[in-house]
Amino acid sequence: MISFNYESDFELDNEMAYAEWLSKVIVSENKKEGDINYIFCDDEYLHKINVEYLQHDTLTDIISFDYSVGNELHGDIFVSVERVEDNAKDFNVSFEEELKRVLVHGVLHYCGYKDKSDKDEALMRQKEEEKMLMFHVEQ
């Protein structure tokens, strides 16, 4: 089950559409959906987690903790809404597009994709683009 939690004033519009999309992404990677919790927060909240758990004294847009068991995906994905907003401006894309990229990025990590080397990062970007095209909202 995919759930959305809020540690800031931000609230996701149409949670159901995002949850259904992320479920489809998981299935498209031949994985099973377990419990995945998205926690939306601000820079300060995520910075504390980054320092405490990863010993990184930097701002970041996403931190994911992977508790997957075999093929069943489980985890907590923390998203700084402030970083997503700033990155959207920096990359000249809409907030919604950058948010989708970050949300799917966490799930792709759980599916086994990495982004530490240039080669791995290129594959991660390709997968993000591919999976973002799967997002549809009925009008």
Image: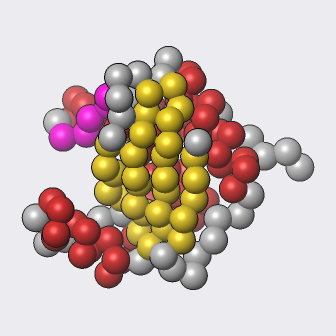
Front-most of residues 98 and 65: 65
Front-most of residues 87 and 134: 134
Q: Residue at x 85, y 45 (%)?
A: 138
Q: Is residue 81 left or right of residue 43?
A: right
Front-most of residues 30 and 37: 37
**Quarter of the picture holding the N terminus:** top right
Q: Position of residue 117 (x, y in %)?
A: 17, 36
Q: Position of residue 101 (x, y in %)?
A: 49, 49
Q: Is residue 8 left or right of residue 108?
A: right
Q: Which residues are magenta?
A: 112-116
Residue 82 in the magenta stretch? The answer is no
Residue 115 in the magenta stretch? The answer is yes
* Residue 84: quarter of image: bottom left
* Residue 119: quarter of image: top left
User: Is 4 drawn above or below residue 104 in the view shown?
Assistant: below
Q: Residue at x 51, y 79 (%)?
A: 8
Q: Residue at x 54, y 71 (%)?
A: 6
User: Is 114 drawn above or below residue 5 in the view shown?
Assistant: above
Q: Residue at x 69, y 56 (%)?
A: 15
Q: Is residue 104 visible?
A: no
Which is the main secondary structure of the residues drawn in magenta? loop
Front-most of residues 15 and 101: 15
Q: Position of residue 127 (x, y in %)?
A: 44, 31
* Residue 69: quarter of image: top left
> How many numbered discs sit on the rendered protein?
0
